[in-house]
Image (cartoon, rainbow, N blue to C red):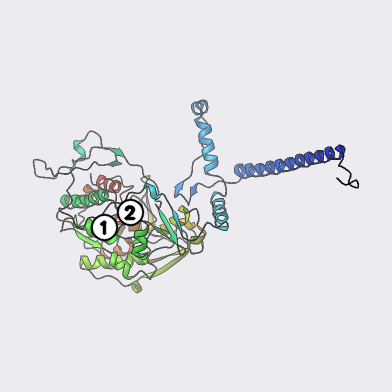
Amino acid sequence: MSDNIKPKSKKNKISREIKKKVFKSNGARLMSGVAMVAFAGLFFVGTVISRPDYSESEKRPLAKRPAPEMLTVMNGKFFTDLNKWFSDTFPYREELLSLEAGIEDYYGVGGEAYYGNKASVVEDTIPETAESLAPVLLMESPEETEEAPTETVIEFDELIETNEDGTLKVDTTPKEKVEIAGEQAGNIYVNNNRGYEIFYYNQGGSVKYASVINTVKALFPDANVYDMLVPNSFGVDLDPSLQEELGSGNMPDAFNYIYSLMDPSIHRISVFDTMVAHKDEYIYYNTDHHWTALGAYYAYRDFCMEKGIEPHELSDYQYVDYEGFYGTFYFATNRSEQLKTNPDHVEAWIPLGTNDAVITLESGEVVNSKVINDVTEANAGRKYNCFINGDNPFTQITNPHITDGSSCVLVKESYGNAFVPFLVDHYENVYVVDYRYYKGNLSDFITDHGVSDIIFLNNVQAITEKVSGMILSIFS
């Protein structure tokens, strides 16, 4: 060591250590103070500002604030429910989730993306054609059972049985309670600022679905039974090689096989080729799993051709358009920035005969509504409710300009909503049944009202065993 360089004194070293500790201590106090202020701010927001009661992202009502009761306070349930309510209904919940999605995008979470769990999916092989028709299902009349709850999944049987008088035996023994939830998308592929729900073929669901349609035809041999299978945007818009790369089965092959399982007397309407022919038009939403009213219109033309009636031209209707729609894909992807840049709008065409409808809500209340509703002020996630005011158990539309007694029942999930307006001008009465919520006996209703046309409309994702059980249950 050079004589000119003096070693650092021990005193100076201790002084520097003390300063470091003081700096760290002050920093810790500062961070603690900031955290406390932030916590206090969040507490203020969470307790003072009004709370949401519905989640657009999850399509469900949010938890309700529990009322304290002696039993629930003592066993702790009240505090558990209170915590759930506090977190589930936190103010600005949707905005905070949007902010989170924006931060993820900033850090590179974007581009081609996949949302879901591929590992949980087992894709079945699609047979070329059916060796025999799907079996008619065994059923017993509700009077023959001791107890028949309104929401049941029916067990499927393989052989046909009849009562002594030759009528079809119907087994409505309750097997499992149906849990009904709002619609949510499954595995989602996002590319080019659009979302797609991936299709995976299921053999059991396909056979059971065809069996249900065959069973209804057996129950009503004199009625016209129509079945319309609707492809989603994944099967129509994306190149088949990309679909295969994503593990999907061939959608038109699936439709052809399902229809080969059905009784030839059933009017089978596959609109796949029609959708492909119009794929460059706005027939599917960018951020939602539904088809648009334009897509439903082209399917309506196919229905008219099968029924032998003349369809109306779009120019015949009054046109309305509602901007600012974000659908299931947008919310299921935690508000993907890609989809955010490509919002939808809801086009609709008002029926000629009437725009009035009578709706039965889940509560049982009967209310007046519209076939095409003004959704200008509706939240971004609810604008598809433009069509027959969304998913309700039962809707009746009576056209005062038709008095020939004609009627149809449309058995549907939400894809059917956009299809309903085009039926209005061809029947005196259009009855719309959502099989997920309907609690009546549809067989009795069809018989009592002399319904001549029974129309089933389902998108490809609804061809499952669970859906088949739900459909069959409303006919018993």
Can you say whether 162 is above or below 329 in the image? above
Q: Secondary structure at mark 1?
A: helix
In the rendered image, the quadrant that contains the N terminus is top right
How many angstroms separate mark 1 from mark 2 (CA)? 10 Å
First in sequence: mark 1 vs mark 2: 2
In the rendered image, the residue lying farthest to the bottom is 315
Residue 302 picture location, percent across and down: 26, 67
Residue 236 % position (x, y) = 34, 64
Q: Which mark is residue 254?
A: 1
Amino acid, disc 2: Tyr
Q: How many C-alpha atoms fall within 10 Å of the one at disc 2: few (<14), some, or many (≥20)? A: many
Q: In this view of the protein, can residue 74 be seen by the observer?
A: yes
What is the secondary structure assignment of the residue under circle 2?
A: loop
Q: Amino acid at mark 1?
A: Ala
Which is more toward the observer, 209 or 200? 200
Residue occupying the far right of the picture: 4
| Residue 212 image position (x, y, % from top left) | 22, 50
Q: Position of residue 354 (x, y in %)?
A: 34, 64
Query: At 18% from the left edge and 45% from the top edge, which residue is drawn?
Result: 137
Labels in figure, total: 2
Residue behind mark 2: 200
